[in-house]
Image (cartoon, grey):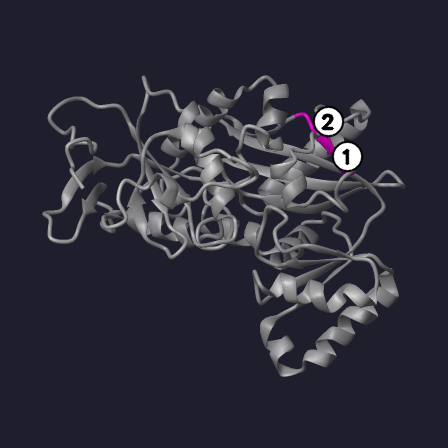
Amino acid sequence: MSTENLPQNPAAQPRKPRVAVVFGGRSSEHGISTVTAGAVLGAIDRTKYDVLPIGITRDGRWVLTADEPQRMAITDRRTPEVLDVAESTEGGVVLPVDPANREVVYSEPGAVPKALGEVDVVFPVLHGPFGEDGTLQGLLELSGVPYVGSGVLASAVGQDKDYMKRVFTSFGLKVGPYMVIRPREWQRDESAARKRIVDFAGEHGWPLFVKPARAGSSIGITKVEDLSGLDEAIAEAQRHDPKIIVEAALSGREIECGVLEFEDGPRASVPAEIPPPSAHAYYDFDAKYIDSTPGVVPAPLTDEQTAELQRLAVEAFEAASCEGLVRADFFLTDDGEFVINEINTLPGFTPISMYPKMWEASGVGYAELVDRLIQAALRRPTGLR
């Protein structure tokens, strides 16, 4: 591959801050991450920032990709792949591991490594394990490179639905009934673990939602109506994560709220309601991204309900020590109580995603939202804070 068109080291002249947009990754959310990257790349103000798109393939290789957002869209119900836009299948990108050096290097077999210049901030749009869960954030902390979004702890808590709910409960936020089956428990006595789920259903009733404990985008989730569907649901969840979480179904409305870090602290957006999708059993992956089931923005709530939801969303943001952005998902139960379901520290950021739609309705458009996240990351130091 020729390196003529690769970004050159601009040390000899004043330069704009360089933003590395990192996307793809090893999780089952690889495709949606690539779609998100296309939207973010298309929105970054090129008069203000230089951009370096870096993709992580499904097998974990870091590659330089084309800066062509239009190629990163869902086409014919298929999500794109990093390899669809990779500049080369041979070369690799290496981030710095020395806090005194933010130089990114590109190398190919048999060629002299090429310096691509310093990176001032990383905008990770990875979803799921190996990117959203604190692993990438830890690498960037070691490298001393600022990045968009929450730090190691908050990212890990936000990815693991078990510990997320434990944190919320400890801060007085109400969560719905749930139980967790850990890998060793399942391996030690599968029938006893299964019986625990059946007993949980006996206490809270059917249907149940069986989920991977550390996945997002509604991937691997099954709504289980009765005992006959339980084994298949467990197998599907474990295909994405050996640790699974089982939640009781709550009767009520699904309401979401975005939290964004401003100069004076986190603020909440207007909320959105996710109506039950007519063609799907629940708000699953296809309903979200393929069939684009629309949410209602703003959600039809009273002023008092909106204020309470916004307060709870910011409280959840603070409880998990989040930074940058969060989407907080709630149920408004039939008796009028808000129950938090989960937070997402790197929520869907596609043009049809609810997080940017809520902020657009709150007066912050997509491009401004991207800029505010980059600026918040540049203001924040790495390390303990």
Quadrant of res 20: top left
Instruction: Name the main secondary structure of what is drawn in magenta.
Output: loop
Tell me where the magenta segment starts and ends, as one range: 270-277
Asked if 106 appears above or below 209 in the picture, the reply is: above
Q: Mark 1, residues whose alpha carbon is within 10 Å: few (<14), some, or many (≥20)?
A: some
Q: Label 2, secondary structure: give it.
A: loop
Are the two marked residues, 1 and 2, in contact with CB atoms closer than 8 angstroms?
Answer: yes
Residue drawn where x is 13% and y is 46% of the image = 113
* Residue annotated with mark 2: 296
Q: Is residue 227 left or right of residue 136?
A: right
Residue plotted at (21% across, 32% down): 7
Query: Percent from the top left, x then y, of residue 188?
Result: 63, 82
10 Å neighbourhood of mark 2: few (<14), some, or many (≥20)?
A: some
Quadrant containing the C terminus in the rendered view = top left
Residue at 18% from the left image edge and 22% from the top image edge: 14
Mark earlier in primary sequence (1, 2): 1
Whether residue 376 can be seen here: no
Residue 67 as seen in the image, left or right of residue 326: left
Residue 291 image offset from top left, x and y in percent: 65, 35
